[in-house]
Image (cartoon, rainbow, N blue to C red):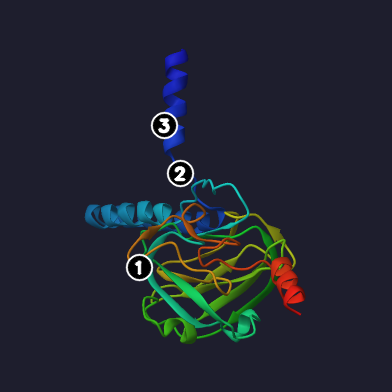
Amino acid sequence: MQDKHSLVDTIRSMLVPIHKDGTKFVIGFAVVTIVLITISQFLGWLGIIATVWCAYFFRDPERFPPDGDDVVVAPADGRISAIERVAAPRELDLDGETRVRISIFLSVFDVHINRAPVTGTIRKIEYVPGKFLNADLDKASEENERQCLTLETGNGTRIGCVQIAGLVARRIVTFVSQGDTVKAGDRFGLIRFGSRTDIYLPPGCDALVKVGQTAVGGETVLAELGTANGRAEKPAEAQAARSKSA
């Protein structure tokens, strides 16, 4: 009996749960599949494949962020498609500062749950309507439909995160509200189907990843805060330095 129980536990541990937002889609695919089976065996198999893919798309695995408040973790799964130094979008209220932007491209096979890159408070959320260009294009960050979030850590450091719709993405979902407190790795939203997530690091903070690398949302460390290796200066330290120089 103990062996059987262990086998069941093992099987359960291998099954990744489906996010509740995707349940209605999986059920819809399944209903259509049942209808297709009555019409044609071939169409039925296509429906089964589509239903399995839909369940796979909305999978919501547990993630285990690294310890410490000085790390910035990936807000999404996917390929790091660009690392550039650009002016922050006005929607993030980051004073148009030049920051390092890390872009993560999510294919239709990646987990599409977005996760908080740092522990902090959601200071602003702004939805921007737009086009549905290929999310891998650089201009997608300015022209595509997107949701902009600004997070502030306990020491006042602000980080921007932008969910960008893609060529087949037609819905950006956000689970948090302005003023909410989140921990690094907490789920804050998802983008249905192919898309992109951009993160704007604090001034002076450099990326610790490279273009082409695969990121794991909530676990991959993109950057670190508050140390000498090109990292952001903490507000308290900056104020002390200005007072000393004065």
Give the side of residue 30 with respect to residue 48, left or right: right
| Residue at 47 percent of width and 87 percent of height | 143
The one nearer the camera, 126 or 41, is 126
Q: Amino acid at mark 3?
A: Ile
Query: Does dot 3 land on a helix, a strand or a loop?
Result: helix
Give the side of residue 46 with respect to residue 149, left or right: left
Q: Amino acid at mark 2?
A: Val
The one nearer the camera, 188 or 233, is 233
Q: CA distance from mark 1 to mark 3?
A: 36 Å
Please name which of the two marks, 1 or 3, marks the residue nearer to the observer. 1
Name which of mark 3 and mark 2 comes first in the sequence: 3
| Residue 127 higher or lower than 60, as above or below | below
Extreme residue in the top direction: 1
| Residue 35 higher or lower than 156, as above or below | above
Residue 11: mark in rendering: 3
Name which of mark 1 and mark 2 comes first in the sequence: 2
Q: Residues within 10 Å of mark 3 (few under 14, many from 20)?
A: few
Name which of mark 1 and mark 3 comes first in the sequence: 3
| Residue at 50 percent of width and 57 percent of height | 22
Placement of the C terminus among the 4 image quadrants:
bottom right
Q: CA distance from mark 1 to mark 2?
A: 28 Å
Q: Is residue 41 visible?
A: yes
Query: Does dot 2 land on a helix, a strand or a loop?
Result: loop
Q: Is residue 34 visible?
A: no
The one nearer the camera, 54 or 44, is 54
Q: Are marks 1 and 3 in contact (CB under 8 Å)?
A: no
Residue 16: mark in rendering: 2
| Residue 171 higher or lower than 130, as above or below | above
| Residue at 72 percent of width and 61 percent of height | 154
Give the side of residue 237 with respect to residue 114, left or right: right
